[in-house]
């Protein structure tokens, strides 16, 4: 019945995303499955960390994604987005020629350097659209030589692993990644900043280092590419609908639940570094700015460690706000209607002030069953 309902209402086959939102309530559909844990929110939670016997709709059908990737589809807050998978498209294939003159804060000199970079890497297999060129150029502070070296290294790694292409074309099995989605990373695209670019919520304080310690490193690298690919696809889809290039997002990193336990797992921290470097070395300049909120004193110590995992350009984009100034800082960059009620805004989904399940709020690591499946698949 779930598969039939999904196929019947798919906006990709029957109309636009806007028409789909108006005609079908994902909130009603996601909450239709009976619960066994009556104390939890009426918004259905992912069973991979909750231990419940039921499964949310996004794990019942291969044609859907976790809501964490789909929140940028919403025009207004308060409802569930369409969960259809993104179109199977190669990177850069839907970039229109005139977008070269619409890229954010890109003047004639940068466009000229992008052209030089494209010529320098013409022999390297990989996307060479204006957005990709600009990302690599900015990642190396405008140096064409350094950007060309980075592009060649990154594209050869991306082609060599085959992860990105497999996830883009949906011919690489992502079942285990979908099972882990609500636990790691505890992040989500939901809402827009004042420029219309997506907001990427990161409940970093709920990140489970025990999971990172136990999970196979190869899986974590693949999962990082899987997550990055879905985020890029979300921006590419929105670019097409809005007829403008959307190339980066505002990150809100919530450290409110950070505890001393975060310091006691060196192996988990080092695996987190592997995840960060996978992004920084191979998928640069996706981040517009980072706003760290509800920052406890101990988090400054952890940040002094973790910040060195990021490139200098990424570190320069970070602003830090303590718990007393959360909404003051966030309101400078986004409408409070997109800020979860739990953080002082007005956005809630169902009974969840944290906007679950669009923003995952994991209560622990994935289930024992999922962990056994990971060990079997990657340690064999």
Image (cartoon, rainbow, N blue to C red):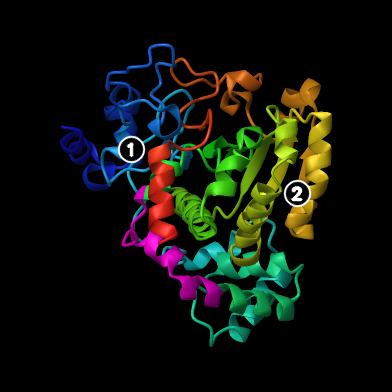
Dominant secondary structure of the magenta stretch? Answer: helix
Region of the chain picked out in magenta, as a range: 155-175
Mark 1 or 2 closer to N-term? 1
- The answer to whether residue 244 is visible is no
> Relative to residue 351, is residue 61 depicted above or below?
below
Residue 173 appears in view: yes
Q: Position of residue 177 (x, y in %)?
A: 42, 49
- For image coordinates 77% across by 58% down, the residue present is 313
For disc 1, the neighbor class at 10 Å (few under 14, some 14 to 19, many from 20) is some
Residue situated in front as seen by the camera: 351 or 120: 351
Residue 58 at x, y = what percent?
33, 37
Instruction: Between label 1 and label 2, give the one nearer the viewer.
Output: 2
In this rendering, the answer to whether 329 lies above or below 232 is: above
Q: Is residue 308 above or below residue 359?
A: below
Secondary element under disc 2, as helix, strand or loop, is helix
Q: Which residue is mark 2?
A: 306
User: Does residue 232 show up magenta in the picture?
Assistant: no
Badge 1 marks a residue whose secondary structure is helix
94 vs 63, left or right, is right
- Image quarter of the C terminus: bottom left
* Residue ID for mark 1: 58
Q: Is residue 216 left or right of residue 12?
A: right
Tag on residue 311?
A: none
Is 168 magenta? The answer is yes
């Amino acid at each position: 019945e779930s598969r039939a309902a999904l196929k019947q209402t798919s906006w990709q086959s029957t109309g636009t995303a806007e028409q789909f939102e108006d005609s079908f309530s994902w909130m009603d559909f996601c909450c239709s499955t009976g619960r066994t844990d009556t104390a939890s929110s009426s918004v259905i939670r992912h069973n991979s960390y909750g231990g419940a016997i039921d499964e949310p709709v996004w794990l019942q059908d291969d044609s859907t994604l976790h809501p964490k990737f789909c929140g940028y589809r919403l025009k207004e807050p308060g409802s569930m987005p369409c969960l259809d998978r993104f179109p199977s498209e190669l990177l850069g294939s839907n970039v229109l020629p005139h977008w070269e003159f619409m890229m954010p804060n890109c003047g004639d000199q940068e466009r000229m350097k992008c052209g030089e970079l494209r010529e320098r890497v013409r022999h390297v297999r990989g996307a060479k659209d204006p957005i990709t060129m600009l990302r690599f150029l900015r990642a190396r502070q405008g140096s064409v030589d350094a950007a060309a070296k980075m592009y060649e290294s990154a594209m050869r790694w991306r082609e060599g692993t085959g992860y990105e292409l497999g996830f883009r074309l949906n011919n690489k099995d992502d079942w285990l990644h979908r099972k882990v989605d609500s636990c790691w990373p505890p992040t989500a695209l939901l809402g827009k900043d004042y420029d219309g670019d997506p907001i990427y919520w990161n409940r970093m304080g709920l990140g489970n280092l025990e999971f990172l310690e136990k999970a196979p490193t190869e899986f974590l690298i693949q999962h990082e590419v899987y997550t990055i690919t879905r985020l890029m696809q979300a921006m590419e889809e929105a670019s097409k609908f809005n007829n403008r290039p959307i190339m980066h997002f505002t990150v809100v990193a919530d450290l409110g639940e950070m505890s001393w336990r975060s310091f006691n797992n060196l192996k988990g921290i080092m695996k987190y570094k592997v995840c960060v470097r996978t992004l920084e070395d191979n998928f640069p300049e996706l981040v517009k700015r980072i706003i760290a909120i509800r920052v406890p004193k101990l988090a400054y110590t952890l940040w002094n460690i973790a910040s060195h995992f990021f490139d200098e350009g990424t570190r320069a984009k970070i602003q830090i706000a303590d718990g007393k100034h959360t909404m003051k800082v966030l309101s400078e960059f986004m409408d409070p209607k997109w800020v979860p009620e739990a953080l002082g805004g007005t956005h809630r989904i169902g009974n969840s002030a944290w906007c679950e399940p669009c923003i995952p709020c994991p209560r622990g690591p994935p289930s024992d069953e999922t962990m056994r499946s990971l060990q079997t698949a990657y340690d064999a």
